Image (cartoon, grey):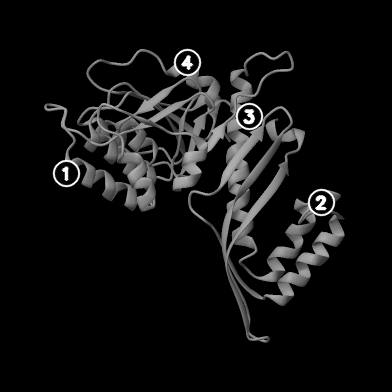
Amino acid sequence: MFRVLISTLVVLISAASSNAATILVSYPKGDEVALVTVEGEIVPNDEKEFQQKVSTVPKAVVAFQSSGGNVVAALRIGKLIRLRNFTTVVPDDMRCASACALAWLGGTNRLMGATARIGFHAAYDKDTGQETGVGNALVGAYLSQIGLPDVAVYYITKAAPTSMTWLNPADAQKVGIDVSVLDAEPTARGEPSTPEQSSAALQLHQRAREFVRAWYQTISGPDEDITPILNRIYSDTVRYFGKEMSRQDVITEQQRFLARWPVRKYIPKDGTVMINCDANALVCSATGVIQFDARSTARNRRSSGEATFEYLLRFPPEFLS
């Protein structure tokens, strides 16, 4: 899906306009997913230009490079991104701070390069340079609207206007900001990754995250929809709860579990899912916390709570063909 987005990103992100953000939309080499780049200071009415340019775009990755700008415009851009179910990314060596970072948070899937810099601080009045309660209230309402917890709101607004809180994966997981890191995989000679490798990493991250979401939706459904999938997703041998087992033994174990708990609901907890991929090896790890509720009417039993999960996902070579 995202075969050439990162390659094209290098070309499209260039010198920004001094009056407004530069907003460009392209379909790299005929890709069905649009690449939308937002670069430069975000100013009032940029949200209108953004809305106009993406009005006919069904799927998009929105890439940011900006030191900030107008908070209201940025929040409106973030809301549009969330409404349209777009992915957001700050690529390697790019900076997205202040108002830009708030817009980036609007992504349904949030991505950042391993060397990207994403920074937050409290809202402030541009004329006085002083923190503004009204601005922070607008930011807090927006963050709650897109599903971030109170601890994330505090993390995002705690730095003074003259300071900056720079996001890192550990903090993101701790405060409930769901983000995946596009690792800059080295080549065999120890050189930096190529744009093609970065593009592959983007594809892998997206597919791995989609797998986690789809898998837990599937096992929350009818048993007859699950069994055929079990035969397709497991390798010949599987490390299952720390033990090496054959595919068939794992399937047998899971079928017993399904029969024991016929009514199930599994939801990945917001902000806990972390994806790390090796584009060279076509391997991703997916970890996080799952909220579950399983019931058996026949046994009059119920089990609910939270549990951690970890998957190692291997993709076939034709994945990138």
Q: Is residue 255 above or below residue 317?
A: below
The residue indicated by pointer 3 is 200
Secondary structure under the numbered disc 4 in the rendered image: helix
> For the residues carrying marks 2 and 3, which lies nearer the camera in this image?
2
Residue at far left of view:
128
Quickly name the residue at label 1: 134
Q: Is residue 134 left or right of residue 320?
A: left
Place residue 166 in its image quadrant.
top left
Q: Residues within 10 Å of mark 4 (few under 14, many from 20)?
A: few
Residue that label 4 marks = 11
Quarter of the rendering occupied by the C terminus: top right
Q: Which one is closest to the eye, mark 1 or mark 2?
A: 1
Q: Residue at x 59, y 60 (%)?
A: 217
**Do tag 4 and tag 1 residues touch (Cβ < 8 Å)?**
no
Q: Residue at x 48, y 46 (%)?
A: 174
Q: Earlier in the sequence, mark 1 or mark 3?
A: 1
